[in-house]
Image (cartoon, rainbow, N blue to C red):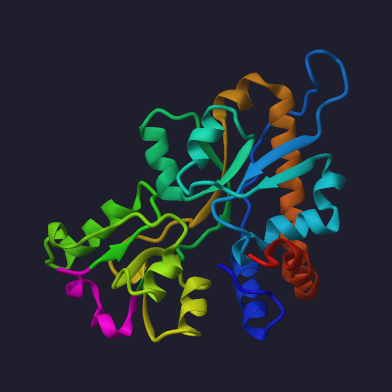
Amino acid sequence: MNSPLHSPISRRRLGLAAAGAALALAGCSTRADAGGGRQSRTVSLLLDWNPNPDHVTLYTAQHTGAFSRAGVDVAIHNPGNTADAAKQVSLGQVDLAVSYEPDTLIAVAQGLQVISVAALIPACLTSLIARKSSGITGAADLGGKTVALSGLASQKPSVEYIARKAGVDPATITMPNVQQSLDQALLTSRADAVYGAFRNIEGIELAEKIPVTVLPAIELGLPNYSELVIIANPKRLHSDAAYAARVKAFLKGLATGQATAIADPSTAVAAMTAPTKGS
């Protein structure tokens, strides 16, 4: 997810991301702080990955002042680890985070205080991307291969499910955790394939550098799901009226950002240029 956003390809990626964004607004309380003072406007948001076109709605809302007009100041933070989102929201270390629907469900099952309040990208983008030279053209070719992952809890079970469905013993697949180095794992031949990369981002970037085969997860047997969701802390939503009001205001601004990004792609490109410069 490292390319500048001035090219026609980048504009196409932005179009895909913006067109896919859909917001399910939460019905949160709007009461002021219990102390009667001025309500805090700040909302801290942890991304799932470095800034990229799938975040176009967020950055368009920030760039155009939609968040400010809705009543919040949003501080956007890059993740140190792609698997940190649910823990940090549950512990109250950040107010909101961009996460993945399957991993949010796993986090809830593990007892973490998280709930999805919006679908940022309501379609599955996760793919298995393989070097052409690996000979991987489908799930049946995964036996004995190395498939690099980025460390999300859902990824290893997903690859194992895909393999079993194709008649491959998952134990024969090596699955190293390379964190945010999925591109490099493939470019340096440390892996035959990567799982967890997105077809509209790494799928395009990698194809510009080496011959690859892009196999969307939903074509490998996984059901469709919302790729990116906004997660909040349900306990805080019910007990902290000021937090609930900030979340509601954030979602209002986000909806405005989505509408702007779809209606005015040039503004969306401008919004993404600074956050992605040099990344």
Taking 211 as reference, is 162 above or below it?
Answer: above
Taking 211 as reference, is 242 above or below it?
Answer: above
In the image, residue 173 lies at what x, y percent? Answer: 19, 62
Taking 77 as reference, is 238 above or below it?
Answer: above
Residue 17: quadrant of the picture: bottom right
Query: Which residue sits at x=65%, y=72%?
Result: 14
Query: Which residue sits at x=52%, y=77%?
Result: 205
Q: Is residue 194 left or right of residue 252?
A: left
Q: Report the magenta residues as a range.
A: 130-145
In the image, residue 170 lies at what x, y percent? Answer: 16, 59
Q: Is residue 162 left or right of residue 119?
A: left
Q: Is residue 104 left or right of residue 172?
A: right
202 or 36, which lies in front?
202
Q: Is residue 62 magenta?
A: no
Count of numbered labels shown in the rendering = 0
In the image, residue 230 lies at what x, y percent? Answer: 58, 46
In the image, residue 63 lies at what x, y percent? Answer: 81, 58
Q: Quadrant of the N terminus?
A: bottom right
Query: Which residue sits at x=31%, y=84%?
Result: 132
Q: Is residue 50 left or right of residue 42?
A: left
Q: Residue furthest top?
A: 35
Q: Is residue 140 magenta?
A: yes
Q: Quadrant of the C terminus?
A: bottom right
52 or 276, which lies in front?
276
Residue 274: quadrant of the picture: bottom right
